[in-house]
Image (spheres, rainbow, N blue to C red):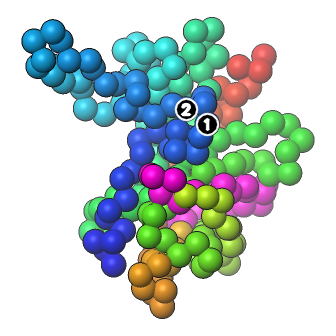
């Protein structure tokens, strides 16, 4: 089961996997063309900072313990940001990722998130998320692409308060190859409150 989940090719820019134009795939922004002699000179590993990011590229704005504030560099400086965490199994293999984003005023949810799960996930079993010992909520998957299967999740004010007060969120999925089994993935919530406030501040400043 672990090997099955480990096959997920984790997309560093989650929103690119979701077809969001604001968050293009990192590979599209860091790839370096080969020089005339045909030798690839390489690029720095990981996400660049704001100063070295290209226009339209993702950069790392800040870290909040287990969370990363990832933004897209725009010409006018109104860089949209999300709060991202790469999720791993108990052996350290990356199996999923989650990215939180702010929503416009008046939205039914107060906070949105995109979750990318492995392609081998049993979609009909849905996605479940709980906080600490709380009751899990069930969320359907929206679609799958070459990177994985996507669930678009909305959180209520009560959900947000639980995330801010909690120690860990627990996400469960079911492998298609082993429908009788459940894979439990921990989402560390340390740093979530500060990270959430950071993307809220960006959204407010951009609006103003």
Pick the residue in front: 42 or 134: 42
Residue at point 78% right, 57% down? Answer: 156
Task: Look at 46% across and 23% down and name the residue there.
Answer: 57
Locate residue 202: give its quadrant.
top right
Query: Label 1 vs label 2: CA separation?
Result: 6 Å
Q: Which residue is mark 2?
A: 23
Quadrant containing the C terminus is: top right
Report helix, strand or loop for mark 1: loop
Which quadrant does the N terminus fall into?
bottom left
Residue 18: x %, y % from top left: 58, 45
Q: Secondary structure at mark 2?
A: loop
Near mark 2 (Cα within 10 A), the count class, few <14, some 14-19 or many ≥20, is many
In the image, residue 137 sits, relative to residue 48, either above or below, namely below
Q: Residue at x 40, y 24 (%)?
A: 29
Label 1 close to label 2 by CB (< 8 Å): yes
Kindly tell me whether residue 194 is visible in this rendering.
no
Please rate how many residues cluster around mark 1, counting C-alpha atoms within 10 Å: few if below 14, some from 14 to 19, many from 20. Answer: few
Residue sitting at x 58%, y 9%: 75
Q: Is residue 161 magenta?
A: yes
Q: In the image, residue 118 lies at what x, y percent?
A: 44, 63
Magenta residue span = 145-169
Q: Label 1: which residue?
A: 20
- Where, by quadrant of the figure, is residue 36 drawn? top left
For the question of whether residue 120 can be seen, the reply is yes
Residue 95 in percent (x, y) is at 39, 62
Q: How many marks?
A: 2
């Amino acid at each position: 089961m672990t090997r099955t989940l480990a096959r997920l090719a984790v997309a560093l820019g989650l929103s690119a996997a979701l077809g969001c134009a604001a968050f293009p795939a990192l590979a599209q922004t860091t790839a370096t063309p080969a020089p005339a002699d045909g030798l690839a000179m390489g690029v720095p590993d990981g996400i660049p900072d704001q100063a070295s990011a290209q226009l339209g590229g993702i950069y790392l704005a800040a870290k909040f313990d287990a969370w990363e504030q990832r933004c897209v560099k725009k010409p006018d400086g109104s860089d949209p940001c999300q709060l991202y965490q790469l999720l791993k199994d108990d052996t350290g293999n990356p199996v999923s990722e989650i990215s939180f984003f702010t929503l416009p005023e008046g939205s039914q949810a107060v906070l949105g998130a995109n979750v990318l799960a492995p392609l081998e996930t049993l979609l009909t079993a849905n996605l479940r998320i709980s906080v600490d010992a709380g009751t899990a909520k069930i969320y359907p998957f929206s679609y799958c692409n070459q990177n994985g299967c996507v669930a678009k999740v909305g959180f209520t004010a009560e959900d947000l308060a639980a995330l801010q007060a909690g120690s860990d969120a627990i996400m469960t999925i079911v492998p298609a190859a082993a429908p009788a089994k459940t894979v439990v993935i921990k989402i560390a919530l340390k740093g979530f409150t500060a990270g959430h406030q950071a993307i809220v501040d960006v959204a407010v400043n951009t609006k103003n």
